[in-house]
Image (tube, rainbow, N blue to C red):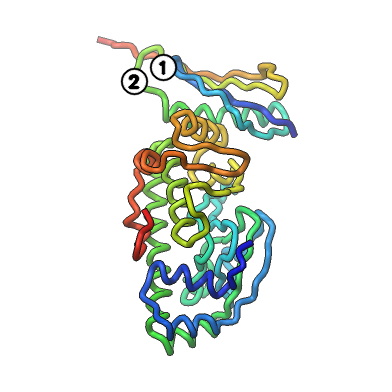
Amino acid sequence: MARFFFDTGDRDLVLLDEIGVECGGLEEVRRVGFEGLIDLTRDALKSVDGQKVFVEVRDENGDKVLRLSLSLQIMLMR
Amino acid sequence: MSPTSSSDVLIRKLETISEIREAEIAVLKSIPIQEKDFSANHDLVREGERPVYSFVVLDGLIGSTKYTSEGKRQITSFFVAGDIPDLHGLHLSVMDCNFSTLTPARVGFMRHDVLRSICDQHPRIAAAFWRSTLIDAAMYREWVTNVGRREAYTRMAHILCELIFRLRAVGRIEDHIADIPITQAALGDALGLSTVHVNRMLQELRRDGLIATTGTRMHAIDWPRLTHAGDFDTTYLHQKNPAD
């Protein structure tokens, strides 16, 4: 087990994770990050074309490990 | 560890929610209470069991929990010192949820047959127990509303307000600083949030100057603003003399 830090944000606000989550490997990091991205999307995604939300994972040395992101596209069709 | 006896913990709680007098207090003091210490994450009562005891929380934090068929856990309420989380077991013989320690905890077991005969002879005590389970139900209603309809930030603020308010009501904390050695995973199970989002919400509350945390200590630095952020109205806790 090692501690990973899941920074989360959208364009306006990035919050650094100061607590971290213990994970047993990259697969778990990915699962934990994905669950976080779903909650973040529900909370922070507004009806704004082009908005991005993301989770960026650091290890204990501060090295970047993984990034998961979603972006919203709104297109008027008529 | 507080020096008061386990009966005193129980009596103090019942006094905050009901009208019990000297006569009832003497009877409550006569209830034999078997104290036991448990480490965190211990199941005190499991779903499907037929307990012959109910327990009063003496120290620490207990959660009522349910599991989905996929094995996901939902914490459905917290219980603090003085609470009798499984008092409904006195009338509903098969337990319909689990009660687990969320932190190291001390609890006191009381025999159902003793409680039943006391209720038969002392209507005021029966009423106080009834009131206690009614307030538990009110807390469950609030919990459903919190998890189902409030945004994550409000949800987190609300649960912290409830814990701090309840710990204050039974004299466990004097101010708005509580030692809550609960894991983020457990907070996530209580709030229906991922661990990553729990961390983000705690971070946001800190950034906004509502809480400060040192290790497991949680300090509500700005109580009025925290209650506002948490959409926290104490009516559902039905305290006789609310401290705040």
> Which mark, by number, is residue A47?
2
**Quadrant position of residue B122:** bottom left
Q: Give percent across and percent down for residue B16.
A: 41, 67
Q: Is residue B49 left or right of residue B143?
A: right
Q: Give percent across and percent down for residue A5.
A: 63, 26
**Quadrant position of residue A6:** top right
Mark 2 vs mark 1: same chain? yes
Residue B50 seen in this snapshot: no
Give the mark nearer the N terminus: 2 vs 1. 2
Q: Amino acid at mark 2?
A: Ser
Q: Amino acid at mark 1?
A: Leu
Of B96 and B209, nearer the camera is B209
Q: Dot 1: what SS?
A: loop
Residue A54 seen in this snapshot: yes
* Structural crowding at the residue carrying mark 2, measured as other residues with C-alpha within 10 Å and reported as few (<14), some (14–19) or many (≥20): few
Vertically, is B99 above or below B113? above
- Kindly identify the residue that appears in the image at 53 percent across and 55 percent down: B66
Vertically, is B42 above or below B220? below
Of A78 and B74, nearer the camera is B74
* Structural crowding at the residue carrying mark 1, measured as other residues with C-alpha within 10 Å and reported as few (<14), some (14–19) or many (≥20): some
Of A1 and B223, nearer the camera is B223
- Kindly identify the residue that appears in the image at 44 percent across and 71 percent down: B14
- Kindly identify the residue that appears in the image at 42 percent across and 71 percent down: B15
Quarter of the figure that contains the C terminus of chain A: top left
Q: Is residue B5 left or right of residue A3?
A: left
Report which residue position mark 1 lands on.
A72
